[in-house]
Image: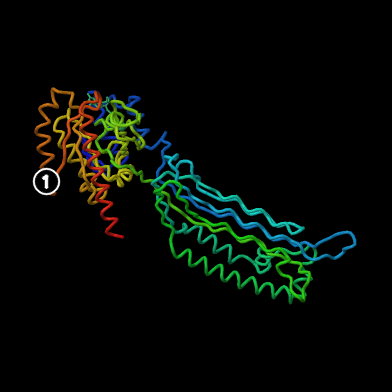
Amino acid sequence: MLLLHSKNSTKLVPPIRAGYCYLRQFHQTLYNCESETRHTSRDRSLDYKLRGKGRNFVDFVRVVARGGAGGDGCVSFHREKYVAKGPPNGGNGGRGGSVIFKASPDETTLNHIPYLCAAKRGGPGQGAARHGLSGQDLIIKVPLGTIIREVDPPASAQSRMEEMEQEETKEEKLKKKWVHYPRSEETTLAKGDFFREAQKLMEEEERYLRWKDRQESQQRLFVDMETEDQNIIAAKGGTGGYGNPHFVTTENRSPKFATRGHQGRARYLELELKTIADAGLVGLPNAGKSTFLSAVSNAHPKIASYPFTTLNPYIGTVDFVDAFQLTVADIPGLIEGAHKNIGLGHSFLRHIERSKVLVYVIDLSVEEPWNDFRTLSKELEAYSEGLTKRPSVVIANKADVTAVAKSNFGKFEKIIIEEFEKNGETVAVVPVSAKYKKNIVKATTILRNMVEQNHAREAVTNDEEL
Ligand SMILES: Nc1nc2c(ncn2[C@@H]2O[C@H](COP(=O)(O)OP(=O)(O)OP(=O)(O)O)[C@@H](O)[C@H]2O)c(=O)[nH]1
Ligand SMILES: [Mg+2]
C-alpha cells in the first residue's frame, strides 16, 4: 500500500491503483490535460493494461504434472479346438506415459501450459499374451530460461487424499489392486492360499516401490532449462499390472487373478520464465528502450509515445559483420515503486536478472535526467541487492532533441560517472538518437566489448572450478 497526498486528504491506495495515479500524472504532463478529463480512452486503456488484461504473455505458472496410470494386467486362458483348458495367457498392462518438459527456442511464453498436465494411461493387457500399449508421453515445450521447481501440494489436496485413504474399505482396497477372472473372485478369496502368496509377493514389490518413491521425493525437483532440447521427466507414469501367467507356480497352474496398473506420480510444480539475454534494457516508460532495440537489432517491438507501450519482454539479436551475435532484452518501463509491484515493472524485472550487462536507457530530453537514473538504480537495488553492480552502460537517448539534450548531457555524464565511482566502478555514457539511428555503432561496440569481457571472465572462473 502507498500513501498518496491529495489536496484534501491522505489516502491509502493499493499498488495497482498507485501505479494508475502515477500514470495519470504522467499522462497529464505528457498531454497537458486537466485532471477532470481523466476518463479518456487512453486512461481507460492504461487502467486495462495495468490490471493485466489483454495480455497473453505469461512468465509464471503453477501446474500439476501427473504421469499416466499403468494399464491393468489381464486374466485369460488359452482356448482352442480340442484344448478345453489351456495355460494362462493374459498380457501385462502397458506403462503409463510420463510428463516431460523440453526446452525449446520456439517458445517465448508459458501461456500454453494447462494447470493439469496429465499423460495418457497405459493400455490394458489382453488375451493371447498381448501386452498393453504404453501410454503416450506428454511432452511440453517450455522457453529457454524456464526454471521448474517442485512445491508442496496445497493443504486441501493433501487432506482430501488422506480422507479418501481412510474412507476406503478393505474390499475396495483389494479391488483397486487385483483383477479376477469372471465369477472366480469368491472362490479365489475363499481358497485363499495361492492368492495370499501372490499378495505377499506383490506387497514386497510395493514396499520396494514406495521406498524408491520416498528416495526420489526427498530430492525436490529443481531444474533450469538453459540449453536447447534439454529434457526433464517431471512425473513418471505408473508401471503396468501383471497378467495372470506372472503368478503361475508349480502348484497353481491356472491363477485366476492379475494385478492392476500403478498410479502415475503426481508433482506440484512452479514454472518461472527468466529470459536469457546478454544485455537487458532498463528505463522509465517512454525513454526509448524499444526504439533503441529496433535500431540495434532485428526485433520490431511496438513503439509509441505513450507509457507502457511494451507489455512483454522482447528479445532482439544484434548481428555484427564478423558473425558475432549478442542478444538484448527489452522489458516494460519501470516506474518509482516498481519493486513493490507498482506499474508493470516488478514482474518483469526477473527478465533482466540473468542479463550479464545492464543497459540503462535514459531520456536526455527531460528536465534533470539524472533523477531518472537514480530512480532506476534505486528500484533495481530494491528488487535484488547487488543487481546494479553488474557491468553497465548508460545510453543517453533522444540526443537529437538538441534544445534540451545538449545542455543536459555534460552535467548528466558527470553525475552518472560520479555515481558509479562511488561504488568503485566505471561506466560509459553514450549519447544516442535511437529514432534517427545516430551513434548506434558506438553503443553496440561498447556492448559487444562488455559481453566479450564477461564471457572471458566466465571462462576463467569455469576453468578454476574444474
Ligand atoms: N526525438 C526522439 N524521439 C525518440 C527517440 N527514441 C525514442 N523516441 C520516441 O519516444 C517515444 C517512446 O519510445 P519507445 O521506444 O516506445 O519507448 P519505451 O521506453 O520502449 O516505452 P515503454 O515501452 O512504454 O516503456 C516514441 O514516440 C519514440 O518515437 C530519439 O532518439 N529521439
Ligand atoms: Mg517499449
Q: Secondary structure at mark 1?
A: helix
Q: Is residue 449 visible?
A: yes
Residue tagged by mark 1? 421
Residue 9, x across and y down, in percent: 22, 38
The N terminus, quarter of image? top left
Residue 42, x across and y down, in percent: 33, 26
Q: Is residue 461 left or right of residue 219?
A: left
What residue appears at the point 62 percent right and 65 percent down from the top-left corner?
Answer: 168
- Please state the total of marks drawn on the protein image: 1
Of the four image quadrants, the one with ligand 2 is top left
The outermost residue toward the front is 322
The C terminus, quarter of image? bottom left
Vertical order, 156 against 3 (above or below): below
Residue 141, x across and y down, in percent: 48, 44
Q: Is residue 14 visible?
A: no
Report the coloring of the rendering: rainbow
Name the residue nearer the viewer: 290 or 227. Answer: 227
Residue 91, located in which quarter of the rendered image?
bottom right
Residue 134, located in which quarter of the rendered image?
bottom right
Q: Is residue 257 left or right of residue 323?
A: right
Q: Is residue 345 left or right of residue 439?
A: right
Residue 48, x across and y down, in percent: 37, 33
**What amino acid is found at the position of numbered circle 1 in the picture?**
Glu
Vertical order, 64 against 320 (above or below): below
Q: Is residue 429 left or right of residue 309?
A: left
Vertical order, 234 against 440 (above or below): below
Within 10 Å of disc 1 (Cα), the crowding (few <14, some 14-19, many 20+) is few
Residue 122, located in which quarter of the rendered image?
bottom right
